Amino acid sequence: MRNPLADVTIPILDDLIESDYVRSLIVGTVGVLGALLVFGALFPDSVAGDLSGIVFSSSTAASTSRLAAPIVLAGLGGIFAEKSGVINIGLEGLLIISAFASVYVASVVGIGNAVLGIPAIWVGFLAGVAASTALAGVFGVVCIEFKADQIIAGLAVWLIALGLAPFMSTVFFGGVNTPNLGARVSWRYSAVMVVVATFASWWALNRTAFGKHLRAAGENPKALDTVGVSVSKVRHAGVLLSGVLSGVGGSALALSIGQFVGSGETMVQGKGFIAIVAYLFGNYNPVGTLGAGVLFAGLDAVQIRLQQLGYAVPDTLVQTIPYVVVIVVLALVGRTRLPEAAGEHYETED
Amino acid sequence: MSRSDAGADGGSDPDRVPSIARRVVAPFVDRSVAERLLISVAAILLSIVVGFVIVLISGRIAQCSTAAWTMPLTGLGFCYDPVEVYVVLFNGALGYPFAVGEPGLFDPNWTPFNLSFGLTLSETTLLIFTGLSVAVAFRAGLFNIGTQGQLVVGALATALTVLAAAPFLPEGPAAGVVLIVVGTLAGAVGGGFWGAIPGALKAYADANEVITTIMLNFIAANIAYVLVLEVFRAEGSSVVATRYVPEHAQYLPWFFPESSDFALLALLVGLGFIGGLYYLVEHTSFGYDLRTSGVQAAAAKYGGVNAKATTVRAMTLSGAVGGVGGSVWVLMSEGRWMASVPALGFDGITVSILAGNNPLGVLPAAFLFGILKGGALEIGFRTDVPTQLVGVLRGLIILFVAMPEFFRMAGRFMGMGSSGPGGPGGSASTAEETGDDSAAVGGGEADA
Amino acid sequence: MNPAVHMDGITKRFPGVVANDDVDLAVERGSVHALLGENGAGKTTLMNVLYGLYEPTEGTVFLDGEPQSFDSPRDAIDAGVGMIHQHFMLVDPMTVWENVVLGNEPKTWGGLRVDEDAAREAVVDLSERYGFDVDPDARIEDVSVGVQQRVEILKALYRGADVLILDEPTAVLTPQEVEDLYDVFEELTDQGKTIIFISHKLGEALSAADEITVLRDGVNVGTVATDGVTREELAEMMVGREVLMDPATTPQEPGDRVLEVTDVRAEDDRGVEAVSGVSFEVRAGEVFGIAGVDGNGQSQLVEAITGMREATDGSVTYLGEPMAGASRREHIDRGMAFIPEDRQERGLVMSYDLTENGILGSQHDPPFASGGRLDWRASREHAESVIEQYDVRPPNADAEAESLSGGNQQKFIVGREFERDPDLVVAMHPTRGVDIGSTEFLHDRLLELRAEGKAVLLVSSKLDEVQGLSDRLAVIHEGEFTGVVDPATVTEEEIGLLMAGETLDDDSVEGAAVHDAATDPAGDAETDDDAGGEEVDA
């Protein structure tokens, strides 16, 4: 099947994206948004008008970037882990633990106070990153040193975080939801972090020696081992990076509201799983992941706004769209190729 | 070489050992199964220890007026008593049969037909189905994370079918039996359909089942929610739920208190499923195909196993068992479909992993998680410790069960050597190593 | 002057196994040294010690007279030792230059960027210096096996290797590529590099090496100069006794046509055509052999015949019935036995015991199954009978397949397949990695089958095996038969030419055509109407 969008050339992106498929994704998204803008401008009173008003309003941008931050950042983290050969299905857990830790530490420090000149909210942010990185470190040790099944260990990370965060919240605050900090991180920071992280990840994966080692560790670890680079170290680095990036995402999510919500699936609500979808969708390319993450988050944000404008769209159905899209894409187009050695243990021979 | 002596004995005199008995006993005699068992027990103990530490630490941080527990020697006070937590957890889940701190070990007034034990068994029953669902797929080499969604769909199918069929039948026990059978079948069909989707996607579109089943869980939950919200919602209900199915179409509680949501009959059905699936996996041609696909897909293909059909069948079967779990949830626990479906499907993964994906192992594993569930309620009633602790324990058990190598290392470290759990695994891996690289043993490998 | 490599008294023990027992090895600078021995003689283990992958249990490695102690390959690399493994250690989706510099990337921007230009230049420089023709920007998965091997050599040279170890370097090459490799050896030794290569082929060691060391059962049997030793002497050193390689075949009139393959085409897993129009037939009571260098489409051809893979074109007729669209199951049920090339991937389920493995392929058929239910007692009796008849050791139906040695695994598979009472046996590399005793046993069984009037399709890369056992011999090259010859009269040189893709002059081809009835469409029409009709469809 010939992909008609594969031929469209994009000046800068072509350099960043080798895959036709990712290119199509981006061209398609930009195209739809462009058409919407045109229709919206021509027929301001129609649904298209409302839609384009929503899509291009600053409040939608704000909520999109707030919702996209955890998806894109965790997705970027997932790329690092999986490229190195460790499938990290526990991204959801990393988001949960960092969301809770950031709010908890910020509230312990106290809004208005500072540690070493860093305002409390940013101390909380760093703490969230640290918590997520630590949990990812445990996951890495379990998978790489103790040869655990990666999928099962990833599920365990999710379940532990899902139990631990509300547990700790109840211990400290007497309820699964923390009180609101009364301060929050502006969505603009989230947006900047997402963009910076995306391009830094792209650079790290494609231009640095570390990126090449990461790829080799996931494709043919023996090749890497026989040239004297430790596969374990590279994989640990990949997993830890997934912790750092997910930590940034989880902290940004919680601090952009100023509260951790721990009831049910917690405030993370499956964003870690959507993150996996986003990077698979983006074919392990950070830029593609950014596109997919923003697309999913944008859908959600638009739906929230539509609801506020009085359109009776069952929100649950709109939230289902990304999941359905993923299945359709997996079934029809996106036979994503996992790294050859992903999910396998590697043992050095001695 | 790696087989136990028991096996060799059977080999020398096959007539004296009936083959069926040998096959039934084999999984327990087999060292790798024994090792699995040991690791499962060790994982549970280790998670209890870690949980103990978590309770202690949080007990230090939490605020309380009087210390619930004081650490010996140090005199440090803690808000939570970790010993009490576990006593309440396990004793409470059974309805306090043990008389702690009083003369006589057992409470003479205890009967098994109490509320707490009923709740524990209710959870056990549901987890038997979801655990079996995950285990069957696992044996075929498929990771069905979608049991949750299959259960949701199966449960909805059961509720709607029974609600639709009930008016056509006269009230009474006979109608009840018919409705339960029809409802269970509907659950199996619904769950089976929902399981067949990722199976077919895997077989014919090469779509990874881990991802598709996760997605289908969300889709099932969302679609079922909207369907009930918009179409099937019971009038005047404050929650999103269907009408209650008629009383006579529900499993009767028999000896247990009605509020325990437990029916002995449902547990018996669960036990029947365990036996049936064990037989299916170990003693039928289909089971052979299924297992072979799971352990060595290339060999299965060579042996004439149709990989695609087996994938679809295994996922359909897995989904159907999950769907029956959903029907039991409706007909035993809730009496209706409601939007807040508990995470039984995810717990099924835990159960299956702990059971080593062996249908027979599902029973003790489900019982353990039943205890955790029943005990969690008691912890909530009797202690100040947040009940989410049980969720943490569940995650820890999975994490530890997932890392057998850790226990092998620990076994070796503690000097258990080849007699310990490190034995079979250790020697097998070295044999592989030398086989691959020096091939000095026997005929060597096909790597020319 | 000290030898470039001196391994002194190397012993390497694994739990329960002594892989190397007090082995001495000395290799002069600028020479080519062959390490010769059967599979499992301990050659690879010895070289892994030299490369730092294994630490020797006893003994010392000296390079240029300096004692070395390698903790890892990294140390060996730093000391100037490079190894080219049998399975290439290359990252398929990465480019040639990325693979060459992997782990030693030149960097700019304070380490934040790989200096691609410098890397590319280094690769081009090295290629030119040693006369390699390699495109630095090609992806590994897109280049030929011969080029991949060159990339491996470049990798070692880039890291400053003075001593190059090659593990079975010719196993995957065509005769022409082998010649090119020998030229590369020459180029390298001229520039002062030292080469050690592992081989189990006598001829190869004799033509490429200056000196040969023979290992047997982990012991150094002796080191000899190439010009002072004969083939026979070397063979005896390897095996430890006189070798009778030629199995006795008796002439026999072939019977009915059992298998007919017509213009079959098939693709490999990546969708590249691997078999490009192959036709032949196998008759009852004859062995039809297919020789060729590995990877020339044999696997895909055999898979297309046995129902493991769908042919993209052409037809396969078995016992007069077309097999197009028939499942693997139907192939088994119609009495086609198949000894697969990879016994540990396909032929056996490694974690199953022999009772369970004995019914692989028959799990739906009586007497092992009735009404979907398995009869384990019958299965067990079957496994025990195979074990007894085919001398599988240990004789224990409860033993797991993975606990058996390669030779015994193979005997069990052969026994299981032969006991199906097949009309056709497709045997692929039936003795690969099998010890000599078992090899002779398996050869005898194949010939017995032929004497019983069964048809045998034998695929092997061992020339002496296919030549000795076959009644007719086809040579495959890049998915096509380059010739079908009479194994009794054809010379090894002629087969070598055919394997390299050349065709023979008219005389020999004519002689072969007499035996090759399948390529004669008139013969088809005469004897079998169904087959003729089938051809029109195809």
Image (cartoon, coloured by chain):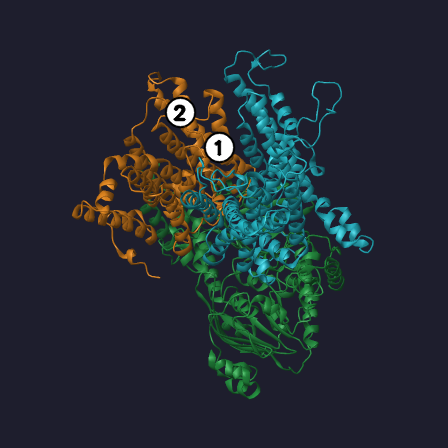
Chain colours: A orange, B cyan, C green
Q: Secondary structure at mark 1?
A: helix
Q: Indicate the position of residue A320 as horizontal and vertical percent values.
A: 39, 45
- Is residue C225 at all visible to an observer of this figure? no
A76 sits to left or right of C462: left
Q: Indicate the position of residue B12 as horizontal and vertical percent values.
A: 81, 54
B184 sits to left or right of B32: left
Dot 2 alpha-carbon crowd within 10 angstroms: few under 14, some 14 to 19, many 20 or more? many
A119 sits to left or right of C461: left
Looking at the image, which residue sits at the far left? A42
Q: Amino acid at mark 1?
A: Leu
Chain ID, mark 2: A
In the rendered image, which quarter is residue A186 located in? Answer: top left
Chain ID, mark 1: A
N-terminal of the pair, mark 2 or mark 1, is: 2
For the residues labelled 2 and 1, the Cα–Cα distance comes to: 16 Å
Mark on residue A289?
none
Looking at the image, which residue sits at the far front? B170
Judging depth in this view, the residue of C417 and B282 nearest the camera is B282
- In the displayed structure, A288 sits above or below A59; it is below
Judging depth in this view, the residue of C208 and A335 nearest the camera is A335
Mark on residue A103?
2
Mark on residue A162?
1
Q: Amino acid at mark 2?
A: Val
- In the displayed structure, A4 sits above or below C67; it is below
- Is residue A74 at all visible to an observer of this figure? yes
How many numbered tags mark residues here? 2
Dot 1 alpha-carbon crowd within 10 angstroms: few under 14, some 14 to 19, many 20 or more? many
Q: Secondary structure at mark 2?
A: helix
Rendered residue at 76%/61% (across/down): C381
Judging depth in this view, the residue of C209 and B410 nearest the camera is B410
In the rendered image, which quarter is residue A84 located in? Answer: top left
